[in-house]
Amino acid sequence: MGEQKRKEVIKQETEFIFSKKNFTWMLIGLGVIALGFILMSGGGSDDPNVFNPEIYSWRRIRLAPAVILIGFGIEVYAILLNPNKGK
């Protein structure tokens, strides 16, 4: 009797929580977040005694954080996406 239960347990197929669709959206979100950090980089000065006003550009202050937040929103969507909805 114990052997039958073990065989039944072994026959059960394991299933991942996330599907290929979830992982695709997660990779898209990571790409958008990486793009935001790339937009935020730069603007430094080689000489520490010289101020470079480029550090306060619109791209670094407004655009890059907005792109990063959009990427985090895509990540939340990817996690909450139900891959079995159409089945």
Image (cartoon, rainbow, N blue to C red):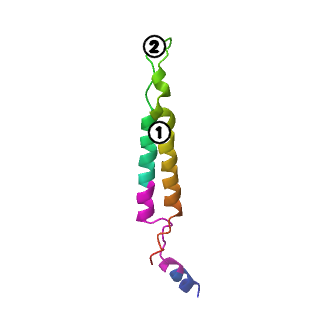
Task: State whether residue 85 is above or below residue 34.
Answer: below
The range drawn in magenta is 9-26
Residue 76 drawn above or below residue 65: below
Amino acid at the residue labelled 2? Asp
- How many marks on residues? 2
In the rendered image, residue 3 lying in the magenta stretch gets the answer no
Q: Position of residue 38 (x, y in %)?
A: 42, 37
In this rendering, position of residue 17 left or right of residue 38: right
Task: Look at 52% across and 82% down and name the residue there.
Answer: 8
* Image mark for residue 63: 1
Q: Is 25 inside the magenta-drawn segment?
A: yes
Quarter of the rendering containing residue 47:
top left
Q: Residue at x 54, y 80 (%)?
A: 6
Q: Is residue 47 above or below residue 54?
A: above
Q: Amino acid at mark 1?
A: Leu
- Looking at the picture, how far across and down is residue 87, in whole percent? 45, 78
Q: Quadrant of residue 5?
A: bottom right
Disc 2 versus disc 1: distance between alpha carbons?
26 Å
Neighbour class for label 2 at 10 Å: few (<14), some, many (≥20)?
Answer: few
Q: Position of residue 25 (x, y in %)?
A: 43, 58
- Disc 2, disc 1: CB below 8 Å? no
The residue shown at (47%, 19%) is 52
Residue highlighted by disc 2:
47
Where residue 60 appears, x then y in whole percent? 47, 33
Circle 1 crowding by C-alpha within 10 Å: few under 14, some 14–19, many from 20: some
Q: Which label number is shown at residue 48?
A: none
| Residue drawn at 48 percent across, 80 percent down | 11
Where 62 falls versus 9 (above or below)? above
